[in-house]
């Protein structure tokens, strides 16, 4: 019974990237990428990040999310080299099935090339057109200028700051919030 839902995550391609469901063979690269202090600082990944955490990401979080519909998670690869360059996710909300939160991280060595923006555009398009969502939301802890730059380049409109809003390992941070609606898509 799991297969049809599990098959629902489409592989997305852009000019330079391929986005597909995480696989067993990605565990080492995900584990290595998430050692980066910046990823641990600005996201909810566990800190310290152990190999078991990468295994959980690939074997449980991503397939379970596809099965239940709670999330869609992609690993992002450079088409030329096949290297893992990041991850993208849509987290859907049981209380509001028409909206989802988008999230991302980039492998340190592949930052500054526009890859995260390129991948975010593809995932946003899929969320609004493929899944037919009404609203995509981006949140970041206040001060994450890099993520905000990506969101704004991908077309997200800044909406403000929510105080003591976003939980990270038991601590609540003030959060920036932005959104993208179907009418904002450039095509
Ligand atoms: C934020 C992050 C995803 C950006 O990834 P990236 O692949 O370097 O992003 P891009 O190359 O697509 O950059 C897009 C734009 O953001 C700008 N940008 C990137 N990092 C920036 C920073 N730290 N401060 C200001 N601008 C930044 C780039 O200059 C680029 O703008 P330009 O085209 O005008 O030069 C990456 O730094 C990262 O993984 N950070 C840690 C995890 C994280 O913060 N995730 C998001 C949680 S909300």
Image: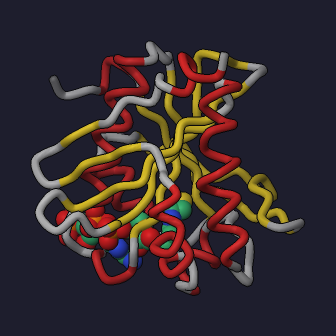
Q: How many marks overall?
A: 0
The quarter of the rendered structure image containing the C terminus is top left
Rendered residue at 64%/22% (across/down): 2
Can residue 146 be seen in the rendering of this structure?
no
Q: In x, y percent, where is residue 97?
A: 65, 17
Of residues 161 and 76, the one drawn nearer to the viewer in this rendering: 76
- Which of the image's four quarters has the N terminus? top right
Ligand 1, seen in the image, is in the quarter at: bottom left
Answer with left or right where residue 161 lies relative to residue 105: right
Q: Which residue is drawn at 46% across and 63% down?
A: 26
Vertical relation: 82 (above or below) 17: below
Residue 156 location (% of width, % of height): 38, 41
Q: Which colour scheme is used?
A: secondary structure
39 sits left or right of 169 in the view: left
Q: Percent x, y for residue 111?
A: 30, 75
Determine if residue 109 is in view. yes
What residue is drawn where x is 34% and y is 57%?
A: 150
Figure quadrant of residue 110: bottom left
Residue 175 position within the rendered picture, expressed as x and y whole percent measured from the top left? 66, 57
């Amino acid at each position: 019974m799991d297969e049809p839902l599990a098959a629902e995550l489409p592989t997305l391609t852009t000019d330079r990237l391929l986005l597909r469901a995480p696989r067993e063979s990605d565990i080492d690269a995900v584990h290595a990428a998430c050692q980066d202090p910046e990823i641990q600082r600005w996201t909810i990944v566990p800190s310290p990040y152990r190999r078991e955490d990468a295994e959980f990401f690939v074997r449980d979080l991503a397939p379970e999310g596809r099965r239940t519909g709670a999330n869609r998670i992609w690993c992002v690869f450079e088409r030329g080299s096949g290297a893992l360059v990041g991850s993208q996710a849509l987290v859907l909300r049981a209380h509001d099935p028409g909206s989802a939160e988008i999230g991302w991280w980039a492998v340190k060595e592949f930052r500054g090339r526009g890859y995260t923006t390129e991948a975010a555009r593809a995932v946003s398009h899929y969320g609004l057109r493929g899944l037919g969502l009404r609203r995509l939301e981006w949140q970041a802890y206040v001060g994450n200028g890099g993520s905000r730059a990506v969101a704004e380049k991908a077309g997200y409109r800044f909406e403000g700051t929510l105080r003591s809003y976003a939980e990270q390992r038991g601590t609540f941070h003030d959060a920036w919030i932005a959104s993208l609606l179907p009418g904002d898509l450039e095509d």
